[in-house]
Amino acid sequence: MRLFLRRKMPGLVRFVVLGLFLIGTLLPFCWMFVTSLKSRREIYGSTLTLWPKDLTWANYAETFRTSNFPQYFANSLIVSLISGALVLVVSILGGYSLARYRFKGKGVLMLVFLATQMVPVMVMLVPLFIVFGNLHLLNTLSSLIITYTAINIPFCLITMSGFFQRIPVALEEAAMIDGCNRMMTVVRIILPIMLPGIVATFVFAFTAAWNDLFFGVMFTTSESVKTVPVGLNSYVQKFDVNWGEMSAGGVLSLLPVVVLFTFIQRYIVSGLSQGAVKG
């Protein structure tokens, strides 16, 4: 019995810890979904109900009727997709250069990229606000696209460089011996192997842009250019919070991220390039 417990205890402890972590992670989302199905009387009633007595989709209907939520959703989608694509292109080119080439100041450049991750985003607000004001880009989606692209490039570039370093150089050398130039080698050989890393990098940049509230509130004021987080923030009034419609909007805003992460789960980054030159 003792031997059995000794063997099974580490796995049991790991299972319990991960289970508690999962419950703590999912609980806020479950509560938000349940709140979105409650009537206003149940939400603001004196008695707390864990599950609505009468399920209602009125909050979702009100979200579309009383607010410009479809426009918010479209704006967030445009900003996130464009900024994510720009970050991905720059990260692929820059990451490959950092992983394969040696040049003077490479170590300093990497340190600068890492140092940018320690700078609070609030520090960049005033300079960006002045620059965008002079360029007449305030209250436009372009200001958000530029901001999210610039903020996410350093981390994604370093991440992509790490993915490139995992791929043996012998693969490129073999392709060049067969007649491929460097560009053809990267496009036809390296990028297909790098697909999981590429998807992971894009999802990170997309999610970071999709979830941002700080710059969205500061740079946009018109309903036509507000993003989803800014739109949800408008439900917080001076003397009241519309929890029902906010919860419904929050559930709807999770859909693109859930779809992306469902897609990325099929990719296992670790070990994809291991043993690629064996045999």
Image: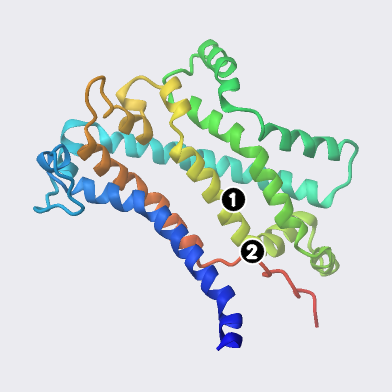
Left or right side of 200 for 184: right
Whole-number angstrom distance, CA of label 2 to CA of label 1: 14 Å
Measuring 43% from the left and 31% from the top, which residue is drawn there?
Answer: 213
Left or right side of 196 for 77: left
Left or right side of 89 for 76: left
Q: Quadrant of the C terminus?
A: bottom right
Foreground disc of the pair 2, 1: 1
Q: Quadrant of residue 246 in the image? A: top left
Residue 140 is tagged as none
Mark 2 secondary-structure assignment: helix
Considering depth in this image, is 204 or 4 the residue closer to the camera? 4
Q: How is the image coloured?
A: rainbow
Q: Is residue 32 visible?
A: yes
Instruction: Identify the residue under disc 2.
Output: 192
Measuring 62% from the left and 57% from the top, which residue is drawn there?
Answer: 197
The residue positioned farthest toward the right in the image shown: 104
Q: Residues within 10 Å of mark 2 (few under 14, many from 20)?
A: few
Measuring 35% from the left and 36% from the top, which residue is drawn there?
Answer: 228
Q: Quadrant of residue 128 in the image? A: top right
Q: Quadrant of residue 4 in the image? A: bottom right
Q: Position of residue 159 (x, y in %)?
A: 68, 49
Q: Position of residue 97 (x, y in %)?
A: 78, 46
From this view, report whether residue 42 is shown above or below residue 234: below
Mark 1 secondary-structure assignment: helix
Instruction: Identify the residue under disc 1.
Output: 201
